[in-house]
Image (cartoon, helix red, strand yellow):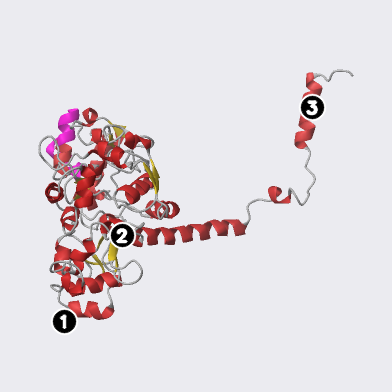
Amino acid sequence: MKAIGFRSLLLVFAVVACKTPERTPENAALQKAPTASYQDEIAQHAKEMLAKGRDVFRDDTFGSEEFWGGKLRLHEAIIGEKRGGVGPGVSPKTALAVGLKVDAERVPAAVAEGIKNGTVSLDDPANTVALLKANAVVGVKAFLEGPKAPSMGITCAFCHSTVDDSFAKGIGRRLDGWPNRDLNVGAIASLAPNLKPMADLLGVDEATVRKVLASWGPGKFDAELNLDGKAFRPDGKSAATLLPAAFGLAGVNLHTYTGWGSVTYWNAYVANNEMYGQGTFFDPRLDDKKFPVAARARFGHKQAPDDQVTSKLAALQFYQLAIPAPTPPEGSYDKAAANRGQQLFEGKARCATCHVPPLYTEPGWGMHTAEEIGIDDFQAKRSPDGRYRTTPLRGLFVRAKGGFYHDGRFADYQAVLGHYDATFKLGLTAPEKADLEEFLKSL
């Protein structure tokens, strides 16, 4: 057989490539462009995911009632001995004082009217029970009737939602994704009649656990305590960090102050290992000797018989990524000064080198050593990467309460600007710092 020349072979391929294939029932679907109905399917799927994710974020306990209610018996302290619990119970006034919030849209009309006219006492623990039954306490889900009763669990909204105070202080419409910087997690956990499970995990006594919980204060939580057992910094201050925002995360890679992983990684981690939900979680990094508590408890190898977490992670992530960063209130900053500050932010002050607009964090792996940003490395070393994440700045005004940086070490904008001015020898004048502050307030 005569060999086919290279040119002839190319010609054959060209003819074959250009020939329109015969339309058959088998390949007809492949030849059709995406139809309007498929686009509708995408839109419908997005709508369903958004609704499901919101429900998960606000109301799903992931089975955490087995820990908070079943082991710590926290619900007993809340409802009080008159209703089958222990002690005097927790009144609405006390609940609000430790930072718990109430969703006004879930408060029964009669109760809302009674609060307004004074016939419903905020000093009576019975009215806390009424609010719990109405599922109106943000982030707390009580099981006071049915097969799980009595018990209680917590949801994502416990730490990452607040309210707008439109009804009264601490009572209003929800602000999902806003960190609750009023929430005293430590004080609330300390109410539990039985802290032995926490003490056993950490290898200390209950008195020590209560001391640690009391050290946190409003708006702070130590997510690494049950990994490494380090309750205090070398300088004696609490190792707890500020509750982070859960808004404005679309386009942001790493979710926490010290990296760890993506938004959905952290959702899985928290649901399983901070909320103590019942699910599946895998991260062999937690076997490292730097995490002795987690390694001993096998936190990186969880697999509950009834997984109540994994099936909800996709919708939860979808909803969180849909939460936009809030816009600063009108009149809360000087617009002319903010415009000047933006020029400094992107120029002389070099802020945009890391806080890249419009994400105001670094696309990709935005992690830096402590030395690079001029601070100690205590918190960074409590993470797998040993670095700090470039925090996204959108909605920064919401996080001003409690201070800035992971532990609130800088009390205000000027303290942050002063730190960077000194660290990087920027030579910023007082008026320039003032303009930069106005720009940060505008984000």
Badge 1 local density, few (<14 within 10 Å), some, or many (20+)?
Answer: few
Question: Which is more N-terminal, label 3 or label 2?
Answer: 3
State the CA–CA distance, disc 3 to disc 1: 91 Å
Residue 11 - label: 3
Q: Earlier in the sequence, mark 3 or mark 1?
A: 3
Q: Amino acid at mark 2?
A: Glu
At mark 3, the secondary structure is helix
10 Å neighbourhood of mark 2: few (<14), some, or many (≥20)?
many
Magenta part of the protein: which range?
Answer: 419-438
**Looking at the image, is 181 positioned above or below residue 124?**
above
Residue 389 is situated, as x and y percent measured from the top left of the image, at: 29, 37
- Report x, y in % for residue 289: 28, 31
Which residue is at 42% across, 52% downward? Answer: 305
- The residue indicated by pointer 2 is 65
Q: Nearer the viewer, mark 1 or mark 2?
A: 2
For label 1, the residue is: 119
* Residue 60 inside the magenta-drawn segment: no
Q: Which one is nearer the viewer's eye here, 74 or 224?
A: 74
Lower sequence index among marks 1 and 2: 2
Q: Nearer the viewer, mark 3 or mark 1?
A: 1
